Structures are given as C-alpha cells and as structure tokens.
Amino acid sequence: MLVGDGSLSVRPALLQEPLGDGRVRCRTCERRCLLRPGEMGWCRTRQNRDGTLVTLIYGIVSSLSANPIEKKPLYHFYPGTVALTSGAWSCNFACPWCQNWEISKRPPDGGEFYSPQAFVVEAVRYGCQGTSISFNEPTLSLEWALDVFRLARQAGLYNTFVTNGYMTDEALTLLVEAGLDGMNVDVKGDARAVREYCRADVEVVWRNLRRAQELGVWVEVTTLVIPGVNDERAVLAGIAARIAGELGPDTPWHLTRYYPAYRFTAPPTPVEVLEQAHRDARAAGLRYVYIGNVPGHPAESTYCPSCGERVIRRWGLWQVENRLREGRCPACGTPVAGRW
C-alpha cells in the first residue's frame, strides 16, 4: 500500500541503493532495510515507490518547543542557552520503556510542515541560540536535518542531535559536514540488553560515538538506568570503562533515573543504584558524571576535576549559576572540558 499524498513531506531519500527488480536498500540507519516496491522500512518513515526510496516525513514536525540545552541533556555545550527543538514520528529502535512513545511508536500521522527556512526563522524569532532534533529518533529526519543545519549555521546557530546513535557512517558524515555541532547519544545497556530490548547492535552505537568525536562533534553519553534491564553494577561499570577508554575521561556521562512508561512497568530506579554507578564511573577515571531525573541531587552540578569546586549549579533542567571564567575553574584555573 502506498502511503502519503504527494505533499511536500514526501521526498526522495538521500541514501539509497537500487538493487534491481525494483528493490532498493535504505542506507540511512544500520538496519539497512531491503524493500520491494510498496514496502516500508522498519521505521515506517521510508517507502519504496516504484524502485525509488522516499522519506515520508521531510519537514514534518509533530512536536516543537524552545528548550534549555540542559534538557537534552548537554551540560558542557553552551550551558544556559536555548535550542529550538523538533520531533517527527517513529523510531528505529524497539525500546518498550520509551518516554516519548506517543510520537516514537507511531508511523507518520499528521503534524505541521516546516520548511528548513521557516524553522530557522522560528529559532531566531524565539531568541534561541541553536537547533536540536530530538523527541523521536532524529536520524529518520536526515534529509530535512541536513537542510536545517546548513541554514542554521549561516544564521549563527549551533546544531544538535539527541539520538540512539544508530545511523550509518555515511549519514553521520553528512550531518557533520552540514553543521552538526553536538550530540547526546543513548547507550542503552550492554550487548545483551540492546539486542533483547532494542533489537539492535550496541557496537554500532560505540562506533558512531568514536566517529563523531573524530569528526569534531561534542559528544555526551546518556544511560537510562532501568531495573532488570541494565542496572547491574558490572554492566554500568563496563559502560563507564568503555567511555573512559574509547571516548576519553572528559566525556560527560549522564546516569538518568527511569520511571515507568509505555509498556514497561518496572519500578523507578533506586537513587542508590545511580549513586553507586556514579562512584564506580569516577573510580574508572571519568571526570564528569551526572545523575539525572533526581531534581536537587548534588550530581546534577558540574565540579572542577582538580579542586572539586562547584563551577555550574543546576536544578532539574535549569542552570542556576555558572561560575566558569572562559571555561576555567574560578578557584584554581583548571580548564573544564566543553564548548563554552
């Protein structure tokens, strides 16, 4: 069955490979779906139309808000600024605990069309300093994101992604070339958890984290800590060790408290589990480890890695105080890693 009405949201997909007999392979994410005419991809946002792969969501915005950059969360990337944030529809992961399931678990279903020009104009009108594509998986909006990023950079805005990190290397390279400046990437667990719950290969995520850093993107990592899924001390310590060893000790890691959502009914994560993981991550050498979704917790704030001075104080999604001086600790002068 063909989907869509030929509107502005239906465009040829940028990364596709014709294979003969009308078949086409999508090269946007690492699922690399092979589609016959009329078939839709795993994500339900791309379709083979007579041997040509099309995206069904170019410019479609299901959700729009001007958010503090801390909400991504990005704590070491222009703190205190605001990014105009958009989401579309669907996802290429199967997580049963999704916090944004109302849009991520649905195929394209309405929304408002924004041309890239209109979106950037809106960002400037709202007084934002940047853009962010988020809420559902932003890789699915690849073609639109590339156009937005180019225009946003011309307007002096930064560009960010909040992503599961499952794009192809081709897609990631194009995003960076177009102006992607910062990413928060979910590492949802070890190989078993990601395979069982997300139906994906976590090594792809680690590959893209390394590659993004190589390309000059500011990277922060988030792990939603979920009882019975990825909350074992050894699993979290393993993630911390990989961040320190493969991305470097200056890479921020956000340990986020889970609350029941969508089809998952496990109880909220005990704060003690997050605090133990925080201690283990610091012992592994990570300099900037955060606890999220626990408003008022001391580990929301940023501390100097040398003298321990609190240099940025946060409450929930908000920066309350920033004492950095040109990216340095005001007490001892030690540089704090980030984009300031």
Image (tube, rainbow, N blue to C red):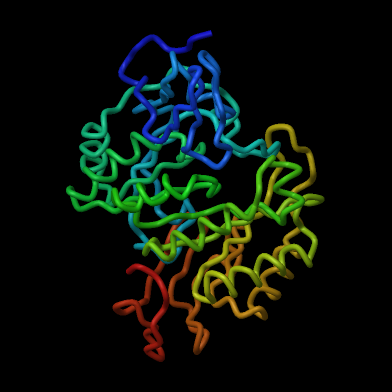
**Image spot of residue 102 (x, y percent):** 57, 28
* The residue positioned farthest toward the front in the image shown: 20
**Total tally of numbered discs in the picture:** 0
Task: Please indicate whether residue 177 sits to the left or right of residue 270 in the image.
Answer: left
* The residue positioned farthest toward the left in the image shown: 154
Which quadrant would residue 44 be assigned to in this image? top right
Q: Nearer the viewer, residue 70 or 152?
A: 152
- Residue 154, compared with residue 320, is above or below; it is above
Q: Nearer the viewer, residue 265 or 163?
A: 163
- Residue 106, compared with residue 234, is above or below; it is above
**Image spot of residue 57 (x, y percent):** 41, 25
**Image spot of residue 41 (x, y percent):** 55, 26
**Image spot of residue 123 (x, y percent):** 26, 41
Query: Which residue is pictured at 42% across the width and 25% down the height?
Result: 55
- Residue 53, compared with residue 326, is above or below; it is above
Task: Please indicate whether residue 52 sits to the left or right of residue 235 in the image.
Answer: left
Query: Which residue is pictured at 41% across the width and 23% down the height?
Result: 54
Image quarter where the C terminus lies is bottom left
Task: Please indicate whether residue 242 sits to the left or right of residue 25 in the image.
Answer: right
Query: Which residue is pictured at 40% across the width and 87% down the height?
Result: 334
Query: Which residue is pictured at 55% across the width and 17% down the height?
Result: 39
Task: Please indicate whether residue 78 sits to the left or right of residue 305 in the image.
Answer: left
